[in-house]
Image (cartoon, grey):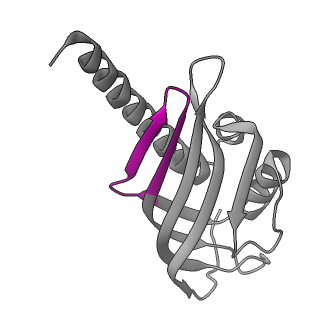
């Protein structure tokens, strides 16, 4: 292998790892309600398509507000598993992430408690600061089960 293809391979592997870390932060920030850190994971022109969303957010600010409102109380756990990441060039990439989540909303919440699994299909962009961010995210479900509401202790 010559130096140039080796350098390209290393850049590709570094990009894949950076994107894995980005999505890991996504899940952690939602579950720990770290909204400032969460906001920094997306481009300003973010597009989202979460068909199950009751608020159908369009754009970054609506999405951030919707997620913070939905997860204001209760408990959640989000997992992403063995992604298929394709680095298309030095500044764009796509991925499909198998996912699992469990969300328990308090009994007085208007949100549905559920457990489910499916896939995130996403597009990423390397921004001017050199960091990868999510610019498009679509969640499709294979299965989603509504759970009974629980009384939550503080």
Decide which of 87, 52 is in the foreground and name it.
87
**Measured from the top left, where is residue 100 in percent x and y?**
45, 68
Q: Check the picture and name the quadrant holding the C terminus.
A: bottom right
Q: Magenta region's main secondary structure? A: strand
Q: Is residue 71 visible?
A: no
Q: Is residue 95 above or below residue 7?
A: below
Percent x, y of residue 92: 55, 35
- Above or below residue 34? Residue 126 is above
Q: Nearer the viewer, residue 57 or 128?
A: 128
Task: Locate the N terminus and report the quarter of the image it occupies.
Answer: top left
**Residue at point 49% right, 31% down?**
89
Question: What count of labels does the image hold?
Answer: 0
The answer to whether 113 appears left or right of 107 in the picture is left
**Where residue 27 sits in the image (x, y, percent)?**
52, 50
Q: Which quadrant of the view contains residue 111? A: bottom right
User: Residue 48: horizontal and vertical position, in percent?
Assistant: 71, 57
**48 horizontally vs 26: left or right:** right
Q: Relative to 114, say whether 64 is above or below.
A: above
Q: Is residue 26 above or below residue 146?
A: above
Residue 15 in view: yes
Residue at the extreme top: 3
Whether the magenta-drawn stretch holds residue 121 is answered as: no
Report the span colored magenta.
79-96
Viewer-proximal residue, 19 or 86?
A: 86
Residue sitting at 39 percent across and 36 percent down?
16
Q: Which residue is nearer to you in this view: 113 or 47?
A: 47
């Amino acid at each position: 292998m010559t130096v140039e293809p080796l350098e390209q391979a290393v850049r590709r592997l570094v990009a894949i790892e950076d994107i894995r870390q980005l999505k890991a932060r996504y899940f952690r920030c939602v579950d720990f309600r770290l909204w400032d850190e969460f906001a920094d994971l997306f481009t300003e022109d973010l597009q989202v398509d979460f068909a199950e969303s009751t608020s159908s957010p369009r754009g970054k600010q609506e999405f951030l507000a919707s997620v913070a409102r939905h997860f204001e109380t209760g408990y959640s756990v989000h997992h992403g598993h063995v992604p298929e990441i394709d680095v298309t060039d030095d500044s764009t990439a796509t991925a499909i992430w198998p996912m699992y989540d469990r969300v328990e909303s308090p009994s007085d919440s208007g949100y549905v408690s559920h457990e489910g699994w499916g896939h995130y299909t996403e597009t990423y962009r390397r921004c001017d600061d050199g960091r990868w961010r999510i610019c498009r995210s679509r969640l499709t479900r294979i299965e989603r089960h509504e759970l009974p509401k629980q009384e939550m202790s503080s």
